[in-house]
Amino acid sequence: MRELSTGAVSEIAVVGAHCDDIAIGMGGTLLSLCADNAGLRVHALVLSGGGTEREAEERAALDAFCRGASLNVTVLNLPDGRAPAHWEAVKMALHDFRQTCDPAIVFGPQRHDAHQDHRLLAELVPTEFRDHINLGYEILKWETDTPQPNVFVPLAFGVAEEKARLLCKYYQSQVMHDWFDEEAFLGLTRLRGVQCRSRHAEAFTAEKISLRLGGC
């Protein structure tokens, strides 16, 4: 499989509808980016969970996933499961967030996610980050909405295991779910690794990419 490289990355934006979405969808990629790009600036926006134990979990988890990075986290308190009813608030939150950063890559949910909060966020992110690389991550959960990804990020040895460990360590409010365990997270990264000739990987869907063929 031919690899394309973005080169050095100095700033990224990550958005999630709920606390833990970002870490589930791209925790391994965060670990890798922060390890490989000294001084990386990470801007995170989460729509719900503000003022609850979920926010405390999210901040602690993202600190662990973004070791060595300059991290800015905003957690709002929109109602969980009701994002479409708060379309204007979500749109304004993204608009305000866009004014605070100029990332090389924006990571958010993928458009065909079965959860309405994830899906709305996926639809609105490209309307604010119009000239950026927008990559949609997949969120492992009960619904059978696993996408057919077209972008893969291979994970170096041990990164997938570290992601799974950190998820179970920091999101204690979620370990009650029968799907929230290290075995499930490693199963998905192993599958994505098979699909890109790597031991483990995370996968994304690309919104739109302009590709220069040949030349300098």
Image (cartoon, rainbow, N blue to C red):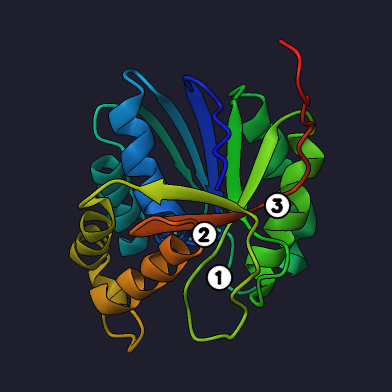
Give me the residue at 76% from left, 68% from top: 85
Residue 76, how many percent across, how many down? 52, 50
Which one is in front, 138 or 115? 138
Secondary structure, mark 1, is loop
- Badge 3 density bin: few <14, some 14–19, many ≥20, Cα 10 Å: many
Which one is in front, 37 or 179? 37
Which residue in the protein does label 3 denote?
A: 90
Amino acid bearing label 2: Ser
The mark that comes first in sequence, 1 or 2, is: 2
Q: Do the residues labelled 1 and 2 touch (CB within 8 Å)?
A: yes
Amino acid bearing label 3: Val
Residue 124, how many percent across, how many down? 76, 50
Residue 80 numbered tag? 1
Secondary structure, mark 3, is helix
- Badge 1 density bin: few <14, some 14–19, many ≥20, Cα 10 Å: few
Which residue in the protein does label 2 denote?
A: 48
Which one is in front, 142 or 20? 142
Amino acid bearing label 1: Asp
Give me the residue at 35% from left, 50% from top: 28
The C terminus sits in image quarter = top right
Q: Distance between the residues labelled 3 and 2?
A: 10 Å
Q: Distance between the residues labelled 3 and 1?
A: 12 Å
Secondary structure, mark 2, is loop
Residue extending farthest top: 216
Residue 42 numbered tag? none
